[in-house]
Image (cartoon, rainbow, N blue to C red):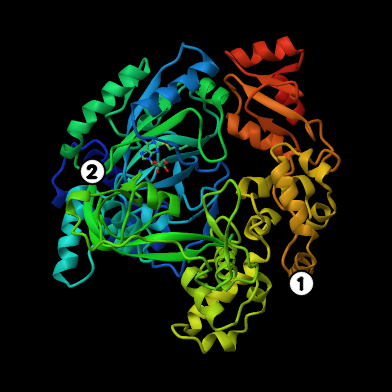
Amino acid sequence: MNRQEAENRIVELSKLLEKYNYEYHVLDQPTVPDAEYDRLMQILIELEEQYPELKLQNSPSQRVGGEALEGFEKVEHRIPMLSLSNAFNEEDLKDFDRRIRDRIGENFSYVCELKIDGLAVSLTYENGLFVRGATRGDGTIGEDITNNLKTVRSIPLSLTESVTIEARGEAFMPKYSFEALNEAKRESGEEPFANPRNAAAGSLRQLDPKIAAKRNLDIFLYGIGQLQGNTVASHSDGLDYLKKLGFKTNREWLRCENIDKVIEYIESWVERRPNLPYEIDGIVVKVDSLTHQEELGFTAKSPRWAIAYKFPAEEVVTKLIDIELSVGRTGVVTPTAILEPVTVAGTTVKRASLHNEDLIREKDIKLGDFVVIKKAGDIIPEVINVIEEKRTGIEVEFYMPESCPECASKLERIEGEVALRCLNPKCPAQIREGLIHFVSRNAMNIDGLGEKVITQLFKEELIHDVADLYKLERDRLLQLERMGEKSVDNLLQAIESSKNNSLERLLFGLGIRYVGAKAAKTLAQSFETVDQLMKADKEQLVAIDEIGEKMADSIYRYFEKPEVKELIQELDSLGVNLTYKGSKPDAGAEVDSYFAGKTIVLTGKLEQMSRNDAKAAIEALGGKITGSVSKKTDLVIAGADAGSKLDKAEQLGIEVWSEAQLQDQLN
Ligand code: IVH
């Protein structure tokens, strides 16, 4: 075979193999025996070895797994990957429905889908070719697991149209693969996975894609993140479109005209659930029309247009052996039940938070009791009640101590709160917990610095405050237990790169009372530097949208403290970035553009660009995009079929532009 013939053959084989692959794994309708597929794959691999330069960028030979990686790169999700709020019963669903009807009226429908129990992934295609796959991570930053995802046979390496799209879905391990994998693990004396979700996540986090390739993972796509050049009007159209592009979508979805139909759908799945070949943990309910979705908008964590109904949790009985006390970052002392280990919803449970003394009294929990436990939302174990009939009389009443279990200062109950608090700011437990918070995912996000390592560093007195993290020395770290050269170097590297974080991560990490991740971002955006923020008085703070009196007061008092001022100065001299690095919706003065400092609402269907691209373009020019029209809105951009938002803009006399006007301005 000459080079030209080899090239033709490689192209032909690649196409054919992907076609067979699609028929088998997406359509579930194989047209050739497995042996034929394997034979052609072997020929392709050999040809590619002979002519490496002819290998196609998206060759099906990558399905068996390429080179192992050293670590995963981080990937930023330009559109955050949010999670869903939960409904646990009919009432929650009806509340959700009422909130929606209050906003958009009666004329809409829902789409119900199975909630697949796996892990969310994002798949990016450029001009129809699969270029990047990532985990959800913290929603903003995930990990690049492209090589592993290429081994998932139901993920197309190229699409039927040459589009640029970011699609989202749930990667999972089917029940039969999970059982086979655990069986093999048990045989070789390894610890089996607790549930299919952990098995799927564990497989996709392997650095060697050959391992992932053997794990029989699968995927269902359920949404579109970004889409260039094309638009869909509804979620259900989106699902059809994904299918048309060659993606695997779940076929069990259903359009429902009202919440009663939704409830019927859910009930039907309570019975059918065990027969599915994969695990589901609930039903996702979404408002279908994208215009309606837009109108409903988002809260900080989740869209208002969707909810996840969770199937009731499994309940089991176990014995309460002890109650342990722990002191949190804010000094709150929390009792934790130590339980005789039991398996609930696939994982072993040994502890459950009891929250506070009032709850212990209310549920009449005594040491030695038999208790019913379940996992709330199938994640966090919770004690539901005591089984009084099982008491023998030797059970012992539990009382909270009067002094802090870590530093022995007197515990106080703050008025209006149920919690007992240690008020000693030097309490070692509070400092340690504060450090753990500082490095955590939504704060400084320092890889390799989890609870264990922080506790170790703290015990060894290598760190006393967050500034000490930036003074750690390689030689000293190498003397610690379980710290090899490689982990020390990785750790120092992760600490070093955290210095470049944008200001909001630091602000959240400092653990200022009432300042969550969202408020931290707002503060960073509004003040841009710590200096400016420290100079702000309460009036300036309260003037910011979303910052209330209580938070403003807490921020002001925090930065007033001399030791905080000192800490900030120290962080500065250690090279930690103290400025905001993200987009600046409010930076009107700096960005010289028409949109700078303006509050803008996008509504209706855009034809020339996707709504997300329009949003990104406007934000890059200093505009702020919001979901609803109010007196504060400066401009409404209305695409085709714009609805109530356009009416409202006209009522309020707000300037309205067409998409063409937007294009002109952007150009
Ligand atoms: S929609 C804006 N649909 O459930 C959120 N999620 O908390 C869009 N999931 O992280 C998610 N099946 O990993 C959606 N049919 C489905 C789903 C689904 C499973 C997962 C997903 C998400 C979590 C929601």
Depth order, front residue of 448/240 = 448
Which amino acid type is marked by label 1?
Answer: Glu
* Residue 154 visible to an observer of this rendering: yes
Dot 1: element: helix
Ligand 1 is found in which quarter of the picture? top left
Which amino acid type is marked by label 2?
Answer: Tyr
Q: Position of residue 246 (x, y in %)?
A: 35, 35
Q: Position of residue 471 (x, y in %)?
A: 67, 79
Looking at the image, residue 249 sits to the left or right of residue 658; the answer is left
Looking at the image, residue 270 sits to the left or right of residue 442; the answer is left
Above or below, comparing residue 634 to residue 45 in the picture: above
Q: Position of residue 153 (x, y in %)?
A: 29, 48
Above or below, comparing residue 451 to residue 196 in the picture: below
Residue at coordinates 67% horizontally, 21% vertically from top-left? Answer: 629
Depth order, front residue of 268/558 = 558
Mark 2 or mark 1: whose residue is earlier in sequence: 2
Q: Which residue is mark 2?
A: 278
Depth order, front residue of 136/265 = 265
* Residue 237 visible to an observer of this rendering: no
Q: Which mark is residue 570?
A: 1
Above or below, comparing residue 232 to residue 380 in the picture: above
For marks 2 and 1, give the one nearer the viewer.
1
Q: Quadrant of the N terminus?
A: bottom left
Residue at coordinates 27% horizontally, 21% vertically from top-left? Answer: 264
